[in-house]
Amino acid sequence: MWIENLPPFIPFFVGAMLLPFLPNRARYFALLIPVWGGLNLFFGASHGDWLNIPMLEFSVQLMHVDKLSLMFGYLFHIAAFISITYSLHVKDKLQQTAGLLYAGSALGAVFCGDLIGLFIFWELLALTSVWLIWARRTQKANAAGIRYLIFQVFSGVLLLGGALLHFNDTGSFEFTYIGLGSIASWMIFFALGIKCAFPFLHSWLTDGYPEATPTGTVFLSAFTTKVAIFALAKTFPGEQLLVYIGAAMTCFPIFYAVIENDLRKVLAYSLINQLGFMVCGIGIGTALALNGAVAHAFNDVIFKGLLFMTMGAVLHRVGHVLGSDLGGLHKTMPKTTVFCIVGAASISAFPLFSGFVSKSMVMAAMIEAGHEYLWLMLLFASAGVFHHAGIKIPFFAFFAHDSGLRPKEAPINMLAAMFIASVLCIVIGSYPDLMYALLPWENEYVPYDITHTLTQLQLLFFSALAFVWLNNKGLYPPELRSVNIDVEWFYRKMMPSIGHVFRTQLASLRDASQHKFMLFVDALPKVSKSSAYSTAQLTKRMAAILAIMLLLGYLSRSLSMA
Amino acid sequence: MSESNQHPDPNEEPGFFDKPSNITLILRVFYVLCVLLVVLDFVVHRHIYTEFEEIPTFYAIYGFVACVVLVVIAKWMRKFIMRDEQYYDANESELPQDGDK
């Protein structure tokens, strides 16, 4: 029944290999893969190193099991199950196949024991996930997919370079604590940083995710960034620099999120904000902080997935998710509305919802570590999350002014997926010990006490009060059809513009030189075929050249002799 | 996808959220809860970990101020970073014409 220590990516890859050759209805069986895989992991995996595959001069460790990889392993099986359920109505097998391969690559990455294995799955993550963007099959999605791929592959190249240099320095490819110092470590750090969406390296996320298919974004939001968090927790725990990077990541995206019109892009910015909390936790590096970081990653996959699912349902039914053109959808999509509110309450860390029990661990660890001002930044970000993800998303999509749209309720499989995610959000939020049992580091934490519950409720209610007040005063920025320029401006506007200038300059240079060359050709004396001096003169000239060459040869020979 | 954009039925009953009286009711309940949370702050003994928290109702004040500041700055940022929806399209529609003669 169970295969002991089977690398969990194998069922996914096998499924993905078979799926394209099976009839369309076979896609329902894809649901069994995460179920069986998850159970097999639970019953069949035991701590330790298994399956060393020799490859050239090295070996690749495909199955390294510890508490951290098991936690992410279970999480990715849950996420894959929810995402596949959500995509069952899609008759485009490209998406399901890419989704299976993508989830499998993520599982491969968290269970591999060395940097070579990590590199292979790291690149596979990029190569498989980009199809979820291209599956939208629009001009914009094609271009966004290419930009996404360039970032991802570049991250992989950095990782490979870093890994090789690291091997050169230490003689080991082991996927374990590295710590900043050598050039190799900085290369690996930035490779992880790209997939973690560090500030200035984040634009692939906010550019790519909103262009993917409704179901594709749900897959995308779950895996790539969380694998990066996993790798960061393993290689750079306790790195001070990460605390500052994380704090910046929590704050800057919320400003963009407030004025962004595309609601899936709002969620993409808010994803960076949530990653910031995890990066902070990893940077602090205490048991409480690291547990908080991975617990928050666990919850974030579920509640951010839930929010992306509700917006995906709107996109599927309405054809767009522009805040400026939505509103009043609660009338015909009541279930999706309720699920969206559950997701919003979870991400905002309302007591009894999942965000509350994990975000608070990072916040508490921040105070313990003595970063009081950074703690204020995180508190600001917490209030901001509630503002843009907790209120703005449900309010502008489902309430606000009536847009007159009366779309049908989401398909049954989407509702089922959203239901499962909502139940998980509430169950984890209400019985956090279920999830705490999975946490890798030894630490006792009690999220529910009077102080914490009261202060969190005060923070959230008064953030909401600010929204009500700003809205009543007409101060709240209206949703406008627009694009907000971000880091991507450098490669989507500035570089193409510079390139355009160069191209026109070079083109005019080419035209001018072509013109000059033609003038030169025209200026040469015309030699007609029947010219009289042909044979005799040619013979004389050749004889002269031979004589000169002979002379030169003689000279060089006599010089070298002397 | 567009088949779903049905327009509202003119005989549609106004929903719960269409009645201004219901909205006012919801907001009143909300205001009462806010006041209750502030009052609780003086009744319940909070644990204090940082000096900021010694300020009475610190979290309520901070939440409110943070959100107002967030919105004001974000609105102001629009002046610099907002462009029309087709901003990038001009550059990107040129891209495929690489086969120069």
Image: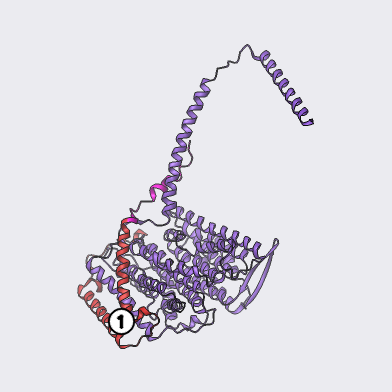
Residue A550, percent across and down?
A: 74, 23
- Identify by letter the chain in purple: A
Residues in magenta?
A: B80-101
Question: Type of residue at label 1?
Answer: Pro
In the rendered image, the vertical position of residue A339 relative to residue A182, given as above or below = below
Would residue A21 be visible to someone looking at this image?
no
Specify the quadrant that holds the N terminus of chain A. Answer: bottom right
Q: Which chain is tinted red? A: B
Q: Residue at x 44, y 57 (%)?
A: A136
Q: Residue at x 41, y 53 (%)?
A: A489
Does the image show residue B78? Answer: yes
The reply, left or right, for residue A316 in relation to residue A331 is right
* Residue A413 at x, y percent in the picture: 43, 70
Confirm whether the magenta stretch covers residue B93: yes
Residue at (39% x, 62% y) in the render: A265
Residue at far left of view? B21
Q: What residue would you read off at disc 1?
A: B56
Q: Nearer the viewer, residue A204 or A26?
A: A204
Residue A162 lies in the magenta stretch: no
Residue ranking furthest to the front: A562
Residue A361 appears in which quarter of the rendering? bottom left
Coordinates of residue A193 in the picture (x, y in percent): 51, 63
- Marked residue chain, label 1: B
Q: Quick one: A233 or A376, which is closer to the camera?
A: A376
